[in-house]
Image (tube, rainbow, N blue to C red):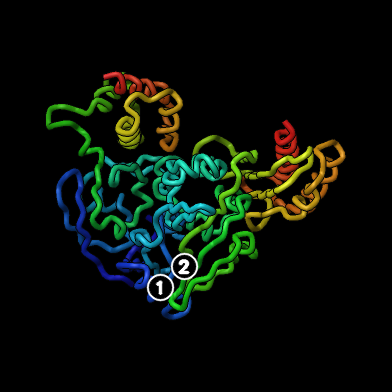
Amino acid sequence: MRTYVPSYQLVSPANLSEALDVLSQDNGRWKPFAGGTDLMVLLEAGKLPHKNYVNIWNLKELRGIEVTGNQVTLGALTTYTEVQEHPILQEEFPMLCKAARETGGIAIQNRGTLGGNIVNASPAADSPPALLAYDAELELVSKTGARRIPYAKFHRGYKQMDIRPDELLRAIRLPRAPSAFPHYYRKVGTRKAQAISKICFAAVASLEADRINHIRIALGSVAPIPLRCFQTEAALHNQPIDDQTIANTTRILAGEVSPIDDLRSTKDYRLQVSLNLLKDFLLHLKQ
Amino acid sequence: MSGKIDINCTVNGQSRKLNVYPMERLLDVLRDQLHLTGTKEGCGEGECGACTVIIDGRIVNSCLVPVAQIEGASIKTIEGIATSETQLHAVQQAFIEHGGAQCGICTPGMIMAAVNLLEKVPNPSEADIRNGLAGNLCRCTGYMKIFESVVRASQR
């Protein structure tokens, strides 16, 4: 350990209401701590600057997957393992299950949470592209009430989010959609297990009378935030899948992403693979 | 600064009361306070699986679990896997017979992951075993013998 552990606080409230009380104190003094798969890595490395945490791991108000006629509500503490084990998610939200299966190994999947993946706000996270393509909505709670926002509006810049220090992500809601849509999810990394993505691509669409409809595309690791590609979607809407559409929309996607060189990949590789994946998705949709 | 807290949990079937700093890693508490040094530290960042233990029936990396989160939990470590004082677990026995251990650092984690896999999937396919052990790295790279040990254990 490269860290002096007694300098860290981790308080364990008995329920959600008590946790929100703590988070409302001293504007930003306390931060939530869930499965620890990101924060403990920083702690061990001596790079966890914040000192005071609220342990939310045992709060049952943040757990469970609830299915109603038109939506699925996932508690923020839903683990990757729980995502993979759920029959409705397997059937209707296969990209989310695939993202969960490709995040870390089983030991990580047993502890890592969807809520943590969202608020940790890594642009390379695996589940956000799937959640964006499924039009997820977030439910945030605080001592003063609850609010809902579209997930596509949550990330505002690198590690910048529409969440106040006194708020907690309580749940993620997914609208249930016809499952006949093709669901296309590809994570490109150095190996199958444990790797952090170089590029992550999630898309759904339908083809009606040979024209593209209901298209939603999102990418990871190509921008400072998990990116919903609204411009590319608009350019594809109501178009046939032909060479001209592919040429036109790969040009638009190239302008919409802003990949960088870093230790995992290069700007050029990320751009090229993003365009390749869009083409592959469109050809897959046409089949 | 934080003070120490009391944590009640079960380790290898025994009730334990711990007096710990809340952010201490479960790995360090197991090794330094309970002297269960079978659980190893490899990378300390959840990549290698050497510190794998089972909490409430699921494998975790004990280097990534702050001890405050194990209140009321049941933990199983490599020391609690053998069937009895004289009888090893089938996975342990298979690792011995088929050369599943080389330097030994990854072995406890490999065995915990394999034991947990066989509890959930008694007759695993090749893909099940590969997926079940995907979070455990062996730097001697003796993967084929580890793989074979798990196959043999599943046939017992």
Q: Nearer the viewer, residue A189 or A32?
A: A32
Assign the C terminus of chain B to one quadrant of the image: top left
Task: Say which residue label 2 marks.
Answer: A168
Task: Say which residue label 1 marks.
Answer: A20
How far across and how far down the image is residue B139, in percent?
A: 43, 32
Residue A235 visible to an observer of this rendering: yes
- Which chain does the residue under circle 2 lie in? A
Secondary structure state at the residue bearing disc 2:
strand
Q: Quadrant of residue A223?
A: bottom right
Q: Amino acid at mark 1?
A: Leu
Q: Amino acid at mark 2?
A: Leu
N-term mark: 2 or 1: 1
Badge 1: residue crowd in 10 Å (few <14, some 14–19, many ≥20): many
* Count of picture labels: 2
How far across and how far down the image is residue A60, in percent?
A: 35, 60
The residue positioned 75% from the left and 50% from the top of the image is: A233
Residue at the right extreme, as displayed: A244
